[in-house]
Amino acid sequence: MNPRHERLLGFVEGVPRTGPETVHIDVTNACNLDCVTCWNYGPALATPKTVGWKRQRIEREVFLRVLDEVAATGVERIVISGGGEPFTHPDIDTFLRAVKAKGLRLTLISNGTLCDFVHVRTLGIDQLLLNVASASPQTYAAYHPNQPPETFHRLMAGVELLRGVTAVNMVQVINGLNAHELVAMVELAHRVGARCSFKVGDVPPGTEHFALTELQRERLLTSSLKDARKKAKELGVRHNLDAYEQQLRGQHDGPLPDCFAGYLYSRISVDGRVFFCCAHIDAGHVQEGPFEQVWRSPRYQALRQRLARKELFPACARCGKHDMNHAAEEELAELRDAGVLP
């Protein structure tokens, strides 16, 4: 049985058979941008983050030890990001090289503004998730107030440079500023050779005026999504529009997918806490013992059982792993239909 099927069987049985497929490590909280709806750096946040929080970053020794431990559990992919921008960490190059030296797939989540795209290409980073939230220089500057429109052009040139070496997924957080650009986002992805990933935009307290209006939401559901799918099919652009639509509707009138996070994914914060998922649900700490010990601890297992009972946390309504859960749910159904899994 391949590792993916092993993990899905663990989900069926309610106990993980192996380590996670992906471990996400946050390396720093520092950031150089001020995206308007960011929970950490939005200029209008009702409760801004403290200076102490913004200065937090993972120690080099901790990162390298944790990397050894998660690799020993059979992890296949490492995601590096942070509460801020990973390229602000002074040891980021060491981290990237260490992951690739272990033969693991590497995903880097970045805003791209501090990224040396030539270096990224040389390192052979497998995937870059680039936070863009726009399809035009004007919208980019509106969403990132401390950046000029020219930054958008520089980022797109960098993406094109990675074509054929690093898979780029342009993350488009959809809100009131950019909802009109859905089709243009697909066209942009085609021009630069990228995939596009759409997400329902958060509106942290203080940023509510950037939320989708009911008219914008209705337009997305009745026409824009259809037009974007048509354009993506025409241009051969990979996307997650089906999952995005499910998420957009699910916030109002549909159930969330089953939660596979406890079998496919784990996240480690800058201060060593181990999170069950992107919702920062505490499952342990890297100082409690080797990662596998934390992964198989009673505390972690209790969280798996809680989510299996659909006893959700408040943050589940804006699930950050919606795409992962959506894909795993569909894959599990296909495997069951084929008689591969019970």
Image (cartoon, rainbow, N blue to C red):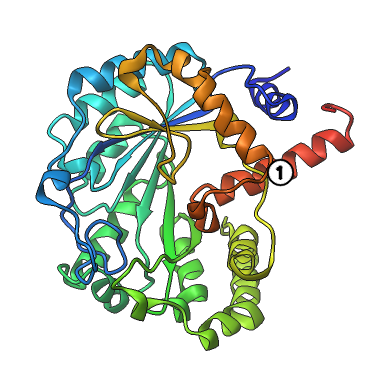
Element at label 1: helix
Looking at the image, which is closer to me, 202 or 115?
Answer: 202
Near-viewer residue (294 or 37): 294
Q: Is residue 222 visible?
A: yes
Q: Position of residue 26 (x, y in %)?
A: 30, 36
Q: Quadrant of the N terminus?
A: top right
Q: Quadrant of the C terminus?
A: top right
* Residue shown at the point (89%, 29%) measured from the top left: 339
Horizontal and vertical percent for residue 12?
74, 29
Image position of 301 with respect to 309: above or below: above
Q: Is residue 331 above or below residue 256?
A: above
In the picture provided, is 289 more to the left or to the right than 259?
Answer: left
Residue displayed at 81% across by 34% down: 335
Instruction: Identify the residue position indicated by label 1 in the image.
Output: 329
Which image quarter: residue 225? bottom right
The residue closer to the viewer here, 85 or 128, is 85
Of residue 201 and residue 220, the one placed in the foreground of this image is 201
| Residue 185, x across and y down, in percent | 46, 69
Q: Amino acid at mark 1?
A: Glu
Is 98 rendered above or below residue 57? above
Residue 142 found in image quarter = bottom left
Label 1 Cα crowd, 10 Å radius (few <14 / some 14-19 / many 20+): some
